[in-house]
Amino acid sequence: MMGRRRGGANAHEMAGIVEAWAGDSAAAAVFGEEAVSRAPHNVALREWLGRLYATRIPRDVLGPSRDAAVAQAMRHLQVVFEAAAKLEIIGFLEQSDCSPAEVGELWPGPSAGARLRRAEFFLGERQLHLVDRELKGDPPEEPALNGQYHLLQGAVAFRRGDVETGVAEWHAAFKVLPSDAWIKRGPWMAGHLPDMDGPIAAQLVDAFSQQLSRLPALTEALAWALVRARNWLSAHRLLEKSAHQSTSLYAAWAEVALGLKDLPETESRAGIVQQRGGVAWAQWRTDFERRMEAQRKGAR
C-alpha cells in the first residue's frame, strides 16, 4: 500500500475508496486524510471522507468516542456543506443515527447567522427546546437576520398554539424585512401556520389582511382551512379578492359556492378550474362533480 503514496491526491482518493470497498474503513481514512492534505479544496473528496467517518459513528453509544467520531465527520462535511447537496448530506447523517443536535453542527459557530440556520433546522425536526436554545438572547440587529429571528419565533409560538404571539412576531418581521424578502418566505410561512379550525383561520386572515395579496401560498393555506371548517362567508370574503392568483384558490372558491348552494357560480368556477388546472386537477374535478350532482338532486 505504501507504493500508492507516490501519486497525487486522486491516487490517494482512489486508494481510500478501494480500501472502503474492501471493508477497511480505518485504512481508507488514512489514505483519505493524506489526499485531503494534498488537495484540501477537493469538494468531492472532503464529502466522501466526511461520509466515511459518519459510517463509523458508534450507534446507541453516548460519550467521548461518539463525540470524536461526529467531530471527524463534521470536520470535512462543514467545509463542503454549502456547495453540496444539503438534503442528501442531512439524510445520510440521519441514516447514520446522528441526532438532530449533531446534524445541527453542519452550521458551526456562535454567529447570529449560524444560530438562526440551526434554529430553522431544529424547527423542522420539531425540536423546540433546541430552537429555544438557539434563539435565546437579544434579536440580531442586522435587518435580514432580525426578520428571520422574528419569523422563527412566530413559527415556534404557532407550533405551541400561541396564536397572538405568533402573529405579533410575524408582524415584527414584516416591519424590518423588505417586502421581496418576506414574499420569498411565503411558502415557508404557510408550512408553519398553527393547527387551524375555522375561527383561528379567520383570525389569521384578519391579522395578515395587508400582506395576503402578496403571499399566495399563505392565502391558499388559510382559504382551504376555512373551506374545511365550512366557514363559507369568511372564505368568500378572502377569495373574492384572491381567487385569481392560482388554480388552488379558484378551486377553493368553487367549494365555497357549493357550500353556499349557489349552483350557477359553482359550475362557472369549477369550469375555470378545469381550464386552468388541466390533468393536475382532474381527480378534484371528478369528486367535485359528484358532490355538485348530489346537490342538484337535493334541490329538485
Image: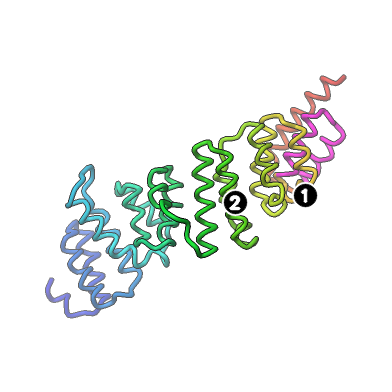
**Vertical placement of residue 257 versus 23, above or below:** above
Name the residue that disc number 1 marks. Answer: 244
The type of residue carrying mark 2 is: Pro
Residue at 42%, 65% (x, y): give it.
82
Say which of 52 and 149 sits in front.
149
Mark 2 secondary-structure assignment: helix
Q: Name the quadrant containing residue 56.
A: bottom left
Q: Name the quadrant containing residue 270.
A: top right
Q: Is residue 130 left or right of residue 27?
A: right
Say which of 270 and 258 sits in front.
258
User: Which of the marked residues, 1 or 2, is nearer the chain's N terminus?
Assistant: 2
Q: Position of residue 117 (x, y in %)?
A: 44, 57
Q: Is residue 123 left or right of residue 300?
A: left
> Label 2: how many residues lie within 10 Å, few (<14), some (14-19) or many (20+)?
some
The type of residue carrying mark 1 is: His
> Label 1: how many residues lie within 10 Å, few (<14), some (14-19) or many (20+)?
few
Q: Position of residue 152 (x, y in %)?
A: 50, 50
Say which of 90 and 217 sits in front.
217
Q: Name the quadrant containing residue 104.
A: bottom left
Q: Position of residue 286 (x, y in %)?
A: 72, 34
The residue positioned farthest toward the left in the image shown: 2
Name the residue that disc number 2 marks. Answer: 187
| Color encoding of the figure | rainbow
Q: Is residue 48 left or right of residue 81?
A: left
Q: Which mark is residue 20?
A: none
Q: Position of residue 287 (x, y in %)?
A: 70, 32
Does 267 lie within the magenta span? yes
Magenta residues span 249-275
Mark 1 secondary-structure assignment: helix
Q: Quadrant of the C terminus?
A: top right
Q: What count of labels does the image hold?
A: 2
Does 56 lie within the magenta span? no
